Image (cartoon, rainbow, N blue to C red):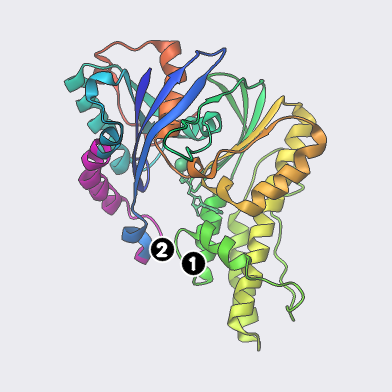
Amino acid sequence: MYILGIETSCDDTAAAVIEAKGGFNKPSFSVLANTSYSQVAIHKKFGGIVPNLASRAHLEKIIPTIKATLSILRIDSGKIDLIAVTKGPGLLPSLLIGVNTARALAYKWQKPIIGVNHIEGHIFSNWLPPVRESKKREARSTKKIEFPALILVVSGGHTELVLMKDYGKYKIIGQTLDDAAGECFDKTARLLGLGFPGGPAIAAEAAKFKVQSSKFKVELPRPMINSKGYNFSFSGLKTAVLYLYNNLTAQDCSSNNVRSAMADEIQNAIIDVLTAKTVKAIENLNPKTVMICGGVSANKALRENMAEEFESYKIPFLMPNTSYTTDNAAMIATAGYFEYIQKKPAKDSWKNLVADANLRL
Ligand code: KG4
Ligand code: ZN
């Protein structure tokens, strides 16, 4: 079936069409079109996302984005079998634009609609195939995932360790008590005067760091790394960065060197904590698959570190293609497929769909 995905939970206006088949036993996907309009330029000067500006930009871009997506395929609405839209969690003014646009289309086209949990969308980014390299060869992925699966969700709004027992069956075993990992990247990047979003900015700055040439020591805490259970905390790291950065720049250190050394240590501290807690969960819970997802899972150092640390456990470790780590609509359409085959919504399901900013897994 052809599924139109729509995502507007935060600051990306995204639409995608995927082809899905195979059911729970042999799920198989190809991404036929995947379009996204980023609002980074709008929010950059504020150093974070401004909800009412996000909502206004979604309103301007949602129809052009959907039209552009469908025109890539040169198909009309009649070919679409299902609309899947993010219904939460996220910023309510942003969610409302996607949800109400999707409902209007479902009514007009007389198609069923599914409201997707954004976090579930991130999880299902792991079911998607690599991005098409040439237009002729269409990448398709068929994945038989073994459950229980342990999933580390690391995005700008969430840091959660989830045990997925089966399709639709999730247990959150650990989560952040304050800031999310992505939020920590964003806030510390701001303290260092780096760009927004902070994750890629910190990663790029860290890449400039050379251990040998560093004349000073930069050491940050690894909050809760040895604490009981699987919860996280990142707000203390932000405070430690503030004090240490002021301290080092007040000394006679070149600010460029300080900044790259700090960026490297921030990245290492976050990676160490995320990896240690995930390893602990692997050892205690014996999952059959491990996955990561969410914007922070784009981080190269994190991916390399985890691949190395998990190797000895001899269980499949999945990472989404980097094109599907940050918010996108292909992952929403994929999650929508599994919901659809479970719930089989009617053509008038648009009537009951509401956005829920605090939706839980
Ligand atoms: O999943 P996402 O696009 O949006 C939410 O659902 O929150 O995640 C956005 C977050 C931002 O905090 C951003 O700084 C972070 O993902 N991020 C990264 C990288 N790329 C994006 N963090 C670390 N390294 C990256 N390469
Ligand atoms: Zn997200």
Task: Specify whether residue 97 is in view.
Answer: yes
Identify the secondary structure beneath mark 1.
helix
Residue drawn at (62%, 66%) of the image = 206
| Vertical order, 341 against 153 (above or below) | above
Instruction: Indicate left or right for 210 with 352 as reference.
Output: right
Place of residue 233 in the rendered image (x, y in percent of width and height, measured from the top left) = 62, 50
Q: Quadrant of residue 66?
A: top left
The structure residue drawn at horizontal position 26% and vertical position 27%, both measured from the top left corner, is 75
Q: Is residue 50 magenta?
A: yes
Residues under numbered marks 1 and 2 in contact, where contact means CB atoms less than 8 Å apart = yes
Specify start and end residues of the magenta stretch as a single range: 45-67
User: Which image quadrant is residue 250 in?
Assistant: bottom right
Residue that mark 2 sits on: 47
Q: Residue at x 56, y 48 (%)?
A: 298
| SS category of the residue bearing label 2 | loop
Please check the rendered image and state whether residue 72 is part of the magenta-colored stretch, yes or no. Answer: no
- Quarter of the figure with residue 106: top left
Please report the residue visible at 50 percent of the width from the left and 13 percent of the height from the top. 23
Q: Nearer the viewer, residue 159 or 210?
A: 210
Q: Earlier in the sequence, mark 1 or mark 2?
A: 2
Q: Return the x and y of residue 272 as percentages of the image width and height.
A: 71, 52
In the picture, measured across the screen, residue 307 lies left or right of residue 245, that is right
Q: The residue under label 1 is which amino acid type?
A: Arg
Image quarter hosting the N terminus: top left
Q: Check disc 1 and report the residue beneath it.
A: 190
The prevailing secondary structure element of the residues shown in magenta is: helix
Q: How many marks?
A: 2
